[in-house]
Amino acid sequence: MTEPVDPLSDQSRQNPRPCRISACMIAKDAAHTIATSLQSLRFCDQIVVIVDAATSDNTEAIARGLADEVEVRSWQGFSAAWRYALSRGNGEWLFMVAADEVAPPVERRNIIDRER
């Protein structure tokens, strides 16, 4: 008998199923919060981070270690940054998250259960 796969585990992130949920984030000078935020998004099939080119801390390096796609772009305003971040998502569902926000366990579970 095989053990069930925890939907928040690394093994589930390697699932070959089509991308259903893309988490999209924009970030600037978020080194102190971005790791916690990105770790809370491990239930997503894809994590995209768009980093403001004016970032002066380790935001980009931290994101590269935890996200599927990281791109550095010049700042053209919030609307343009979010539109671009969302355009990079492949999922049927796009989850917008700020670099200082954390997806609470209850919300993660609700999203996962809804997708089954």
Image (tube, rainbow, N blue to C red):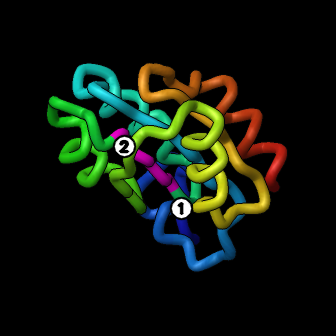
Q: Nearer the viewer, residue 22 or 28?
A: 28
The residue located at (53%, 51%) in the rendering is 6
Q: Main secondary structure of the magenta part?
A: strand
Residue 106 is left or right of residue 14, and the answer is right
Label 2 sits on what residue type?
Val
Q: Callout 2 environment at 10 Å: few (<14), some (14 to 19), or many (20+)?
A: many
Residue 51: mark: 2
Give the structural element (helix, strand or loop) at label 1. loop
Residue 18 is left or right of residue 88, and the answer is right
The residue located at (22%, 42%) in the rendering is 62
Label 1 sits on what residue type?
Glu
Residue 39 is left or right of residue 87, and the answer is left
Q: Callout 1 environment at 10 Å: few (<14), some (14 to 19), or many (20+)?
A: few
Circles 1, 2 touching at the beta carbon (< 8 Å) = no
Marks 1/2: CA–CA distance:
38 Å
Q: Nearer the viewer, residue 41 or 7?
A: 41
Image location (x, y in percent) of residue 58 = 16, 36
Screen quadrant of the N terminus: bottom right
Viewer-side label of 1, 2: 2
Screen quadrant of the C terminus: bottom right
Q: Which residue is mark 1?
A: 3
- The magenta span reads 47-52
